[in-house]
Amino acid sequence: MRKGAKAAIVGSVFAVMVGGAGYGAFNIVNALDGDGGAPAADGPAPVRTGPPSAAEVKETSAAFFAAWEKGEAASAAALTDNAGKARPLLTSYGQAAHITGVKITPGTPAGRSVPFTVKATVSYGGKSKPLAYGSRLTVVRGVTTGRALVDWQPSVVHPQLRDMDDTLVTGESAAPPIEAVDRDGKVLTKEKYPSLGPMLNELRAKYGDKAGGTAGVELAVRHAAPDSADTPLLTLAEGRAGRLPTTLRASAQAAAEKAVLKYPESSVVAVQPSSGEVLAVANNRNDGWNAAFLGQVAPGSTMKIVSAATLIDNGITTATGPAPCPSEATWQSQTFHNIDNMPPNEKATLSESFARSCNTAFVKYADEVKVDSLTDEARNRFGIGLDWKTGIPSFDGSVPASGGPDTAAAMIGQGQVQMNPLTMASVTATAATGAFRQPVIVPRSLDGRELAHARGLPAGTVQQLRAMMNRTATSGTAARVMSGLNGRIGAKTGSAEVDGRASSDSWFTGYRGDVAAAAMVQDGGHGTDAAGPIVAAVLRSGA
């Protein structure tokens, strides 16, 4: 429950005063009275409003740090705006996590934000190691009381704590450590390939006991989210790592890691169309989330690969058949437009409208596409939404059967359609080969898990999709980005509008030989602005 009533923190005041922290005790009294003095004779002081002052920021943070250092979880929690969540985490810090000797050094405040460093000791089973890290907190004004309080976020205690119910534990590791290797036996570490950090944790949680290792002792974040792997923070006693093979290719992973660094909030996946094996997966995100596998966002015009296949497979038109491209198209009272400055062409073929990424050409066919046609094509031909078992958690796409304006929106990758770079790389691989091969990052031979199956595409459809994607890559919207790439190539650009954001998400997918890759950059603009260069860099590396 959020802090507000005076009674919610009175019970914690005495503990801090008795603890001998004069400065901390003064500040809690100050928080109770509102101005550091006795209540006015004619009644309680008025509730303060506005941002906390610099003095309040300093006093509140100092009192919080003092209580935290002494292990007084209840007192520290009472100085936050969510004592109910703060108290168990602060309690686990000294108990389940076995962290002692805490020394907190505040940095220079920046407005209401206070950076700080923590130095402590972690001890368990006769083993001890020093712990050091940095974090920050923000001081806010209590909504009902007007008191200065720490805005409670679990990341205050440690930056790797993200969910309100995440906690810290020290003990025997939940799974033995692993030594992940690429397809050629090269060792993959999070130090050399930072994007792999969260994925290596997931692989360890699932396959650690199958890889032949033995558990060690460590301090770790135990995540509240179901099926989430622990995040190791400090190793007190080394276990023996078991060797775990992956489908990754070290050279492709290196190229992907380098490419995403140029664009904030970006993700990319590369797969081998002939096998479905994942060659590389990289993310450059502030939150450390594996959006490449777990993202659930609109893919924009990259979805036109599936839409074009739907039109062809249902006999509505062909690559050389008609797909007029007017300046706008209205479907069930919703008007759709093309990108700025795109000249209309009422005589355009599907191939031309695909290569130019004409939205209205696809929207105008919405009347002829049954409500579930796009859904069936995505699921039965491209394997979207079939519960993939890649080896780590993944979201496997969603193309719901929706009526109304969403039918037209889905044709251009908007509305309720949700994808990520993994699913779009797989879509591209299926378009390039005609066969759906479920992506995997761990060989199926390791555990014999059942993979998803889909029918794939007719040979005639594959031939037409390849021709349209090649035209896009050589003379269409993707030509500038794909310039210089030779051999069998194809591509599709996309941008997806997101409610409430001024910039669209940048999407791009393409293939070269036996490598297909897809990328997404949040707020990246058009497909060739950000996602395109990432994909091109991965394809140029030879993957």
Image (cartoon, rainbow, N blue to C red):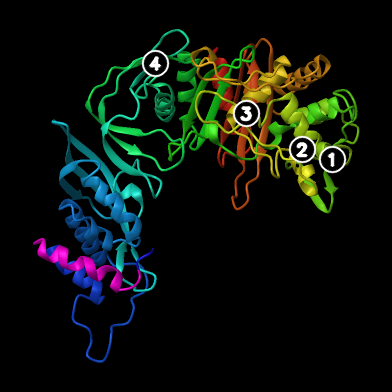
Name the residue tied to disc 1: 366
Q: Secondary structure at mark 2?
A: helix
Give the residue number, with chain letter if any, for mark 4. Answer: 211
Q: Tell me the element at label 3.
A: helix
Task: Kindly report the distance in space between the C-alpha atoms of the residues bearing marks 2 and 3.
Answer: 16 Å
Q: Residue furthest left?
A: 20
Crowd rating for badge 2 (residues with CA inside 10 Å; few <14, some 14–19, many 20+): many
Which numbered mark, 4 or 2, is in the foreground of this view? Answer: 4
Q: Check disc 1: other Cα within 10 Å, few if <14, some if 14-19, many if 20+.
A: many
Given residues 183 and 244, the one toward you in this image is: 244
CB atoms of marks 2 and 1 within 8 Å? yes
Please, what secondary structure does the residue beneath circle 1 have?
Answer: helix
Q: Residue at x 80, y 14 (%)?
A: 459
* Residue stretch rendered in magenta on the structure: 4-22
Residue 479 shows in this picture: no
- Say which label, 4 or 2, has the lower sequence index: 4
SS assignment for the magenta stretch, majority: helix
Q: Nearer the viewer, mark 2 or mark 3?
A: 3
Lower sequence index among marks 1 and 3? 1
**Dots 1, 3 in contact, CB < 8 A:** no
* Amino acid, disc 3: Thr
Which element carries disc 4, helix, strand or loop?
A: loop
The residue that label 2 is drawn on is 411
